Image: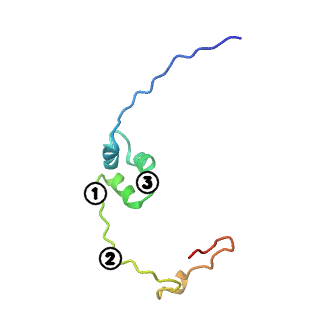
Amino acid sequence: MQVLTQPWYQIRPLWQGNDQIIKQGLPFNRLSPYWQMFLLGDGAPTRHLQLLTQSEIVVDVVQMVDIGASGDDAPQKFKPSPLPVSVARFG
């Protein structure tokens, strides 16, 4: 039995940082904003905007109200569709 040996190709990091530095994002000359959004984003639109603009994003929630089954006087085209049979309601 013959064992083939391959040279070891060490990965040389271009950048590394702790969680606080990663939250700030990378300079665009290190990693494009689109790759940052893909690799460092958490799915939240505010996080995506922060990575794309390299700015702090602040959201002020004016009001959160449970409208229940009410349509909240939305136009008919925005009325919710009935839930599929496979979706269960809890609570």
User: Which amino acid does the dot numbered 2 rest on?
Assistant: Val
Q: Position of residue 37 (x, y in %)?
A: 42, 50
Residue 10, compared with residue 39, is above or below; it is above
| Residue positioned most to the front | 91
- Name which residue lies at 43% across and 54% down: 42
In the rendered view, does 77 fall on the left or right side of 33?
right
In the rendered view, does 23 fall on the left or right side of 91?
left
Query: Which image quarter holds the C terminus?
Result: bottom right
Tell me the SS state at disc 1.
loop
Instruction: State the residue position of label 3.
Output: 42
- Name which residue lies at 54% across and 86% down: 76
Instruction: State the residue position of label 2.
Output: 62
> How many angstroms separate mark 1 from mark 3 (CA)?
15 Å
Near-viewer residue (52 or 47): 47
Tell me the SS state at disc 2.
loop
Instruction: State the residue position of label 1.
Output: 56
- Name which residue lies at 34% across and 49% down: 23
Near-viewer residue (61 or 73): 61
Residue 65, compared with residue 7, is above or below; it is below
> How many angstroms separate mark 2 from mark 3 (CA)?
24 Å
- Name which residue lies at 69% across and 74% down: 85
Which of the labelled discs sits on residue 5, or is there none? none
Query: Which image quarter holds the N terminus?
Result: top right
Structure colour scheme = rainbow
Tell me the SS state at disc 3.
loop
Q: Earlier in the sequence, mark 2 or mark 3?
A: 3
User: Which amino acid does the dot numbered 1 rest on?
Assistant: Glu
Question: Could you tell me how many numbered marks the image carries?
Answer: 3
Q: Earlier in the sequence, mark 1 or mark 3?
A: 3
